[in-house]
Amino acid sequence: MRRPIIAGNWKMYKTARETVEFFEQFKPLVKISHHCDIVIAAPFTVLVDAVKAAEGSNIAIAAQDLFWEAEGAYTGEISPLMLVDVGCRYTLVGHSERRQLFGETNQNVNKKIKAALSVNLTPIVCIGEMLEEREANQTQKVIQTQFLEGFAGLTAQAFSRIILAYEPVWAIGTGRTATPEIAGEVHEYIRGLADASFGQPGARNLRILYGGSVKPDNIKGLMAQAHVDGALVGGASLNADSFGSIVNF
Ligand code: 13P
């Protein structure tokens, strides 16, 4: 059985004070939630506060991005070791907002995944198609390219340490969730790609999260799908009550 993961992606929201307040409200809501792993991806500036606030709880902290070099003259970038140093255990890689707005390529994603794994940070790698691509029946092709290029050169052992998130771009922040059936279908396709590239048991054990307008009222239907192993939640993770309800689906 694959252990579910419910992860929140705060994107560019929350100050240090808001972070502390969130955890004060959120921790009691998930104190006895042992059925899943709980992760929050916070902005760089509040990672220290989030790690401190989550100390001793069942909540792990993630970064939202990283750079692949260990150190150097890279103004504005954050290295994998710096994230470990402040207590992060996970990092998002290749979020569609990074791909669309900041020129993230599959080749960069590949380097970031390897860099994260080299310091034992668990990458949550995001893939997904845009609306035009879905409408042009290109979904599988887009996903396949992101998968093959993003995971190029990884061993089966390295791949076994990765978490995937399927986030159809047309469902992000739009209130337009993929139906459980659409999500289930793409997740099954992704598991097939994992099998073809890395074999079993890697494909069977791979956890694939769904992301895109996940809310307290649609999480149950999504989680009922055989190949949906959790969620990556944007907007609804900013509020302790709504994220608490999603964790306790
Ligand atoms: P929303 O849940 O706000 O649609 O965002 C999804 C997302 O991008 C999570 O990474």
Image (cartoon, helix red, strand yellow):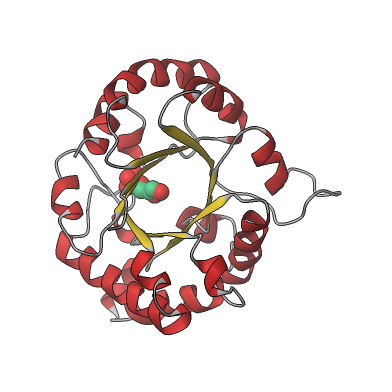
Quadrant position of the N terminus in the picture: bottom left
Q: Is residue 19 above or below residue 137?
A: above
- In this image, 241 relative to 224: left or right? right
- Observer-nearest of 131 and 72: 72
Q: Is residue 103 above or below residue 194?
A: above
User: Residue 102, how many percent across, how many down?
Assistant: 59, 56
Quadrant position of the C terminus in the picture: top left
User: Residue 101, how many percent across, how many down?
Assistant: 54, 55
Which residue corresponds to the image point at 46% horizontal and 19% vertical from the top-left? 18
- Observer-nearest of 68 and 116: 116
Which residue corresponds to the image point at 81% horizontal and 48% vertical from the top-left? 71
Q: Is residue 106 above or below residue 249?
A: below
User: Residue 103, how many percent across, how many down?
Assistant: 60, 62
- In this image, 140 relative to 64: left or right? left
Residue 84 location, quadrant:
top right
Number of numbered tags placed on the structure image: 0
Say if residue 182 shows up in the picture: yes
User: Residue 41, how many percent across, how many down?
Assistant: 48, 39
Q: From this viewpoint, which residue is outermost toward the right?
A: 73
Which residue corresponds to the image point at 14% horizontal and 41% vertical from the top-left? 217
Q: Is residue 70 above or below residue 86?
A: below
Say if residue 133 shows up in the picture: no
